[in-house]
Image: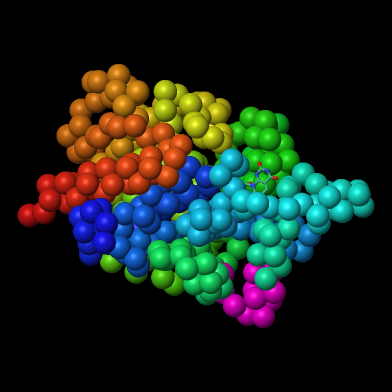
Amino acid sequence: MTDAAVEFSDFRVAALAGGVGGAKLVRGLDSVLQPGKLTVIVNTGDDFVHFGLQICPDLDTVCYALAGLADPMKGWGRADETWQVFTSLAELDAPTWFQLGDKDLALHLERTRLLQSGWSLSALTRGFCDRWNIRSRVLPMCDEPFRTRVRTAEGKLLDFQEYFVRERCEPKVQEFVFAHAENIQAAPEVLPALLEADLVVLCPSNPWVSIDPILHLPGIREILQEKVVVAVSPIIQGKTIKGPAAKMFAELGIPPSSLSVLDHYADFLDGFVYDALDREVFQNYDAERIILYGTDTLMKTDEDKTRLAAEVLRFGQNLISRKAP
Ligand code: FO1
């Protein structure tokens, strides 16, 4: 066993994640926790149907990262990918705004086949994770379709991938709309996983479109109020490493800063991890209820992911002992 695995033996963690930044910390958490002690609850608001196939970008980004299959440059899709189908689609003048690699396509084909044969998204994701020898549990936030849409300042309502990929996040955001969300329930293992966890970690994912859809599900916020919850900021010095979170904050009239991320989750948060470069942002912060921890949050290498994950877990353990009666 590694030192970290001994240090965190029996520590159970539930992580909320979506997108490339979230997947990086998830990989770090997976490497320092004991097998089976990490459950990742993944945003499915970005999912959509393309060429008749069910595409689950955040679920796949997390699974590829955990399986060691992810494209290290893009963060999404697979390493050593080939593009035969995509090139042939382009020759047919088919839509090519969303890139689908050959290996990635195999996953979408098989997932769509299984869904059509009556499998739930949770069950088939478990099957894929087993095939890839993933040690942690990966859960889609819900099994039914839940769609994040973006209402633009011009009044258009765009599906998330249309906004994110086709329109390159260029339109100004007015609000986010969670479609099909009225009667939706969390996937069966999600609430029990949160209840069982010693610590809940909100990964450095986009608060608006990666974490908020998960928080929108009935029962989640109520559980988080009772749990020790730590969030890691996706914003450093007013900017995101990748993705449009900072732009979204600004367009919604909120200063894009790590303090705004903390405020976004303030009703249930116990601890907040910010980048040490943002020390000045928190200089006058009254850390009475939400305890702060500043460190290097940039994750370029696997060592960075492991180091940050271990720091987040140690911080969480300290918060748990502070909270204990
Ligand atoms: N992101 C892009 O910017 N362009 C793409 O063409 C693209 C294709 C794609 C295919 C499969 C997949 O799992 C992810 C893909 N992504 C692409 C990433 C995805 O749009 C975003 O990472 C998330 O939806 C935002 O969290």
Residue lying at the far right of the rendered structure: 92
Residue sitting at x 30%, y 63%: 34
- Decide if residue 207 is in sight here: no
Residue sitting at x 78%, y 59%: 51
In the rendered image, the vertical position of residue 173 relative to residue 268, given as above or below? above
Q: Nearer the viewer, residue 232 or 81?
A: 81
Residue 112 falls within the magenta-colored stretch: yes
Q: Is residue 286 left or right of residue 170?
A: left
Quadrant of the image occupied by residue 274: top left
In the rendered image, the vertical position of residue 240 relative to residue 303, given as above or below? above
Magenta region: which residues? 111-122
In the rendered image, the vertical position of residue 194 relative to residue 83, given as above or below? below
Q: Is residue 3 left or right of residue 79?
A: left
Residue 52 falls within the magenta-colored stretch: no
Residue sitting at x 84%, y 50%: 87
Q: Position of residue 232 (x, y in %)?
A: 36, 40
Q: Main secondary structure of the magenta part?
A: helix
Q: Position of residue 291 (x, y in %)?
A: 21, 37
Quadrant of the image occupied by residue 143: bottom right
- Decide if residue 301 is in sight here: yes
Q: Nearer the viewer, residue 21 or 220?
A: 21
Quadrant of the rendering where the C terminus is positioned? bottom left
- Here the colouring is rainbow
Q: Position of residue 175 (x, y in %)?
A: 57, 38
Count of residue discs: 0
Q: Nearer the viewer, residue 183 or 14?
A: 14
Quadrant of the rendering where the N terminus is positioned? bottom left
Residue sitting at x 25%, y 35%: 293
